[in-house]
């Protein structure tokens, strides 16, 4: 995959996603209701960046704008160095509930991401089989998605997003619906796969631990109208250890983010 790069997420890597001064309002009770108030952020090539903020702070709205489903009222969105504001088709997206085609087998679901990437049907089927083997799902390749557990469905959903030839992967609370143990397994799994592939990721979660375990940087958003309260560089080395949460710096950063979220909730 030409898109699967192995650059480190250093400060000199190319910016893949750049939001500048994004503003968005919705009309409610005939009055404009400001949701996003001048959000600026970026994701570099091969970087894992997380958005964390109170419920209703506009994180999903931001994803809809980045995906081109809606247009911002103010500001610009640049993907791969080009102004793509209001344009669709530039990101791959993984929602909270796996978005698989229920009428296709698991293998065909994965292969369809590869045909979107321009591969012929035979090549896509062969590569899909290899990928399913690699992520330990070869046994269910011929099954339909509803037969799979939630965690397995999310693995296939992540694989589809990974194989789409897009500049940025947007993952919107992908593990929120999973039980605690499956969620921890999924985090470790995603971390390993992402560290091999080093795609540019924008991730949304409500879990501070998840953000600190996975990310290179975190943007903490205020409650609506959302602004960036703080940008936090996560200092832990890669490949990241599964027990990184035991480090004193992890506990300190967790408290810092918690304090920020508390302060914005209490305003
Ligand atoms: N189409 C719409 N029309 C009117 N209001 C909307 C619309 N979409 C979102 N909103 C409002 O914008 C605000 C932000 O919603 P959004 O779903 O983006 O927040 P969120 O941070 O993703 O929330 P959560 O963390 O709970 O998923 C909410 O107050 C919501 O009611």
Image (tube, rainbow, N blue to C red):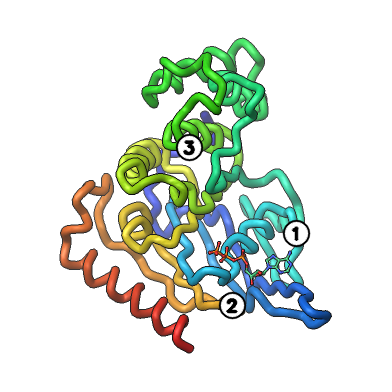
Disc 3 from disc 1: Cα separation? 25 Å
Q: Quadrant of residue 86?
A: bottom right
Q: Is residue 214 left or right of residue 205?
A: left
Residue at point 61% right, 79% down?
Answer: 225
Query: Residue 224 — which label?
Result: 2
Q: Which structural element holds mark 3? A: helix
On the image, the x and y values in percent for residue 37 come to 63, 78
Seen from the viewer's position, the closer of residues 72 and 205 is 205
Residue at point 59% right, 25% down?
Answer: 109
Query: Residue 154 — which label?
Result: 3
Q: Classify mark 2 as within 8 Å of ligand 1 or not, answering yes or no.
A: yes
Q: Is residue 148 left or right of residue 240?
A: right
Q: Is residue 73 left or right of residue 18?
A: right
**Residue located farthest toward the bottom when viewing the structure as drawn:** 267
Label 1 crowd bin: few (<14), some (14–19), many (20+), radius 10 Å: some
Disc 2 from disc 1: Cα separation? 18 Å
Disc 2 from disc 3: Cα separation? 29 Å
Q: Which residue lies under the disc numbered 1?
A: 70
Marks 3 and 1 in Cβ contact (< 8 Å): no
On the image, the x and y values in percent for residue 206 come to 43, 62
Q: Which structural element holds mark 2? A: loop
**Residue located farthest toward the top when viewing the structure as drawn:** 122
Residue at point 23% right, 47% down?
Answer: 242
């Amino acid at each position: 995959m030409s898109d699967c790069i192995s650059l480190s997420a250093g400060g000199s890597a190319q910016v893949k996603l750049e939001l500048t001064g994004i503003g968005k309002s919705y009309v409610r009770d005939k009055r404009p209701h400001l949701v996003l108030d001048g959000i600026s952020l970026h994701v570099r090539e091969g970087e894992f960046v997380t958005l964390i903020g109170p419920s209703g702070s506009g994180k999903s709205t931001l994803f809809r704008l980045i995906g081109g489903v809606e247009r911002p009222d103010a500001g610009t969105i640049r993907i791969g160095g080009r102004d793509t504001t209001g344009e669709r088709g530039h990101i791959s997206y993984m929602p909270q509930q796996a978005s698989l085609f229920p009428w296709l087998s698991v293998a065909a679901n994965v292969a369809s991401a590869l045909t979107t990437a321009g591969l012929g049907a035979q090549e896509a089927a062969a590569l899909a089989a290899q990928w399913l083997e690699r992520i330990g799902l070869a046994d269910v390749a011929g099954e339909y998605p509803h037969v799979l557990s939630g965690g397995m469905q999310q693995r296939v959903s992540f694989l589809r997003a990974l194989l789409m030839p897009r500049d940025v992967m947007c993952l919107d609370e992908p593990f929120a619906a999973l039980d605690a143990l499956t969620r921890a397994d999924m985090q470790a799994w995603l971390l390993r796969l992402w560290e091999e592939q080093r795609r540019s990721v924008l991730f949304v979660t409500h879990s501070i631990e998840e953000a600190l375990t996975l990310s290179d940087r975190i943007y903490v958003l205020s409650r609506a109208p959302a602004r960036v309260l703080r940008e936090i560089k996560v200092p832990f080395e890669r490949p990241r250890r599964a027990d990184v949460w035991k480090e004193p710096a992890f506990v300190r950063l967790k408290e810092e983010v918690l304090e920020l979220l508390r302060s914005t909730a209490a305003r």
